[in-house]
Amino acid sequence: MAVASRKSFGEALLDLGGKDDKIVVLDADLSKSTMSKLFADEYPDRFFEMGISEANMIGAGAGLALAGKKPFICSFACFVTGRYDTIRISVAYSQTPVRIVGTHVGIGIGEDGNSQMGLEDVGLMRGLPNMTVIQPGDDIETKQAVKWMVDNDVPSYIRLTRQNLESVNGSDYTFELGKAVELVPGDDITIMASGGTVHNSVLAAEMLKKEGISAGVVNVHTIKPIDTDAIVKYAGSTGHIFTVEDHNIIGGLGTAVAEVMATSGVGGKLTRHGLHDAFGESGTYDELYKKYQLDPEGIAAVVKSSM
Amino acid sequence: MAQNYDISRLKDIAKKARIDVIKMLEEAKGGHPGGSLSEIELVVSLYAHEMKHYPDNPTADDRDRFVLSKGHGIPGVYAVMAQLGYWSSDDLMTLRKVDSPFQGHPDCCKLPGIEASTGSLGQGLSIAVGLAMASKLDNDKFRVYTIIGDGESQEGQIWEAALSAPKFELDNLVCILDYNKAQIDGFVSDVMPIEPIADKWRAFGWHVIEVDGHDFDAIIAALEEAKATKGKPTFILADTVKGKGVSFMEGKVDWHGVAPNAEQAEQAIEEISNS
């Protein structure tokens, strides 16, 4: 069943929040959208509505973390990461174990348009020392990723969708931080996707197979620490990695892969697909994914033209 | 009513701390004398009188927390904490040197006893709010104190934090403004005026007390009044002199972030010693 990862997160937080009273949740007037409301309704004493003051929310989260709580601070990805200096100093540099939750990522949010879309957030968070960056691809992965965040007292950032995500992992799946997951084996090219582009990449690979192209698909759910071994392996075996993300191709998954390919000496070609140094715009999810070629047909077409 | 205190002891700690500030900045050939000296009586009141804290156990669960939001003033705090037994005055001479735990702006990861890493202005008050929220969750386990700057009050995040503390009825939180009226590019009133200060914080829902920031009796009485004030946080507007204690620094913009040379340091120390 397809579930938006923001919803998976909300459900996970509600479940885990009942088992660990150190968990506290903060939101900036978006709890109905980030789904932190599920926790808020059940555990009002441990939920703090901070209003539209994201920087203060981040700082208060740091204070709560310093006093031994496990704070989840929630907003849209662009708004929370937009208060970058507060995250830089009060969270990353201070090493306060604040769990930053950024929802509504990518053009996938649709009609609200660019100002609400997280398109550069991975780039910002990735560049911070001490920060873990996770972008889960489906319901089961999201729930386990949230559990990882609860269990690990380190600064972390999770990137969540508004749109529904089809399952890409089996019911026996075990999330391992930093370990990319091969979903489809392939010989000619390796598609590396994350979050909202994972399932579409699996469908794209099926289309390409019909045209005689053997495209593998790897789910890179952890952008930091990036799975360097996987990148070296697939660059070596297929000679061509194709990254696809609902994010600027500058700074996110594509850039992280480029760094590994270039510095490892493994060689091989890299094609980065996503928002090509562009902002988003209004439209339905379907219209936008089609226009920006993040839908299965679009991904297949861009893969083909890159070969 | 404040517990009995020995004002001559407090003044002595302040004097020794001021001397150490001058010494460590001269040795480091850098640092912020103006704001380190203006805050001394405030910091001494907190560490030598008001706060429950344990120099031998800086991570004790129930300790009161102090966040220096105006992080550049950390030499003053390092110096006062030395007098209280956290480290020695000799240790302070490694200020700003590579691998020293006495970083140019406070780093809580490198130095137990320092509660938060600040220095990028505008962030410490929010951290203090979060600490106070945590304390409320745990039955008012500890109180939280923070010192902010007047230039720092130009940062938007300060006002986000100011909005939030009354909402959560953080009567365990005290925010002190070290109102020394000077920043880097000039006097606060010329750079970006923030007056009327007391009116603003009152309008935001804080209990406001105005004191002479160098008068121990007034500061301590204000801290008592803060403890007795229920349901809202307290803001103490402390009128201070930038560079207090050193005649050629007092009230001057120029001494915000410039260290005294050997000759100036000698003169400064002599003045402070004879005061």
Image (spheres, helix red, strand yellow):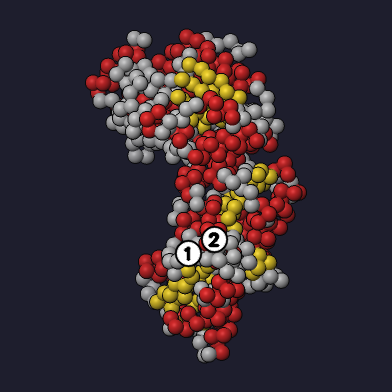
Quadrant where the N terminus of chain B is found in the figure: top right
Residue beneath label 1, please? Answer: A279
Q: Residue at x 72, y 41 (%)?
A: A45
Bin the neighbour count of mark 2 within 10 Å (Cα to Cα): few under 14, some 14-19, many 20 and up.
Answer: many
Q: Amino acid at mark 2?
A: Met
Residue A258 appears left or right of A295: left
* Residue B108 image position (x, y, % from top left): 48, 37
Say if A1 sits above or below B233 in the image.
Answer: below
Q: Residue at x 65, y 28 (%)?
A: B232
Which residue is farthest right? A42
Residue beneath label 2, please? Answer: A117
The secondary element bearing badge 2 is classed as loop
Q: Residue at x 59, y 52 (%)?
A: A75
Bin the neighbour count of mark 1 within 10 Å (Cα to Cα): few under 14, some 14-19, many 20 and up.
Answer: some
Report whether mark 2 lies on the same chain as mark 1.
yes
The secondary element bearing badge 1 is classed as loop
Spatial CA distance of label 2 from label 1 is 9 Å
Tell whether label 1 touches label 2 (CB within 8 Å): yes
